[in-house]
Amino acid sequence: MIKKGLNLVGVQVLISVVKKLKVVSEGQANGRELKLGCVQKFKEIPDRGHHLTIEGIWEESMAKELDPALFGEGSWSASRTIEKSKPSVEFLEGKVVDLRMQLREIKNELDRWATETSEYRKSSHQRIEHLGQRLSRVEEVQGRVSDEVVLKVSQLHSRLGERQGLDRKVQDLVDRHHAVLRAAELRHSQLQKIIEEKEAQILATQAALNDARMEIGRLKRL
């Protein structure tokens, strides 16, 4: 985003320079020639290693503007061209200085942004490392808790198996007790029946004995 903003600033500066050049060139008879000369000067700046001076621009402007054949208009005198080109050269020199100042400010802004980015990267790296350490500790604790849960679940399963075995044994004992009770009840009912039969036999024997006694007593009286 900052690079795009810087590019937009540079484009806006160039547009303002072109607009001011148009304003300066309006009303002048040699505006077209002066503009072409300025463009040629800017094209030649990289070849010189950016060593642009007022004297160099002045000398080359003098050389071209004193030769009317270069621009196809021989009716203009060299003195008038030089007089009209002086403000334009000074204006361009001021614009070059402004552009250099703006480029210096842009460079400072880029350096500041790079410093802030580096600091933010360091702080982000530290935060990520801190979060990684916390995550490792959480994973370690989670692993221990998981192992404990698995151990407790296995113990519960073993205890549940033992409890189920005890329940089966208790159920077997209860079943045996019920069987013994049923057998005892059956034996008791059988004994009760035998007792009743014996009582009936005793009663019958007692009655027969009484009859025998009565018969013996009657015989004695005879």
Image: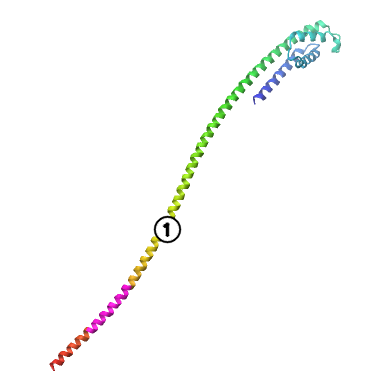
Residue 177 lies, with reference to residue 26, above or below; the image says: below
213 vs 121, left or right, is: left
Q: Is residue 76 above or below residue 111?
A: above
Question: What is the quadrant of residue 101 in the picture?
Answer: top right
Rate crowding at label 1 as few (under 14), some (14 to 19) or many (20 or more) other CA atoms within 10 Å. Answer: few
Pick the front one: 128 or 72: 128
Q: Residue at x 55, y 27 (%)?
A: 123
Position of the C terminus, as image quadrant, is bottom left
Q: Which residue is mark 1?
A: 165
Residue 81 position in % (x across, y down): 80, 8
Magenta residue check for 69: no
Q: Is residue 36 left or right of residue 124?
A: right
Instruction: Residue 184: name its quadrant.
Output: bottom left
* Residue 188 part of the magenta segment: yes
In which quadrant will I find the N terminus? top right
- Residues 172 and 208: in front is 172
The magenta segment is 187-205
User: Which residue sits furthest bottom?
Assistant: 222
**Magenta region, main secondary structure:** helix
**Taking 51 as reference, is 70 left or right?**
right
Left or right of 95 on screen, residue 125: left
**In the figure, residue 55 lies in which quadrant?**
top right
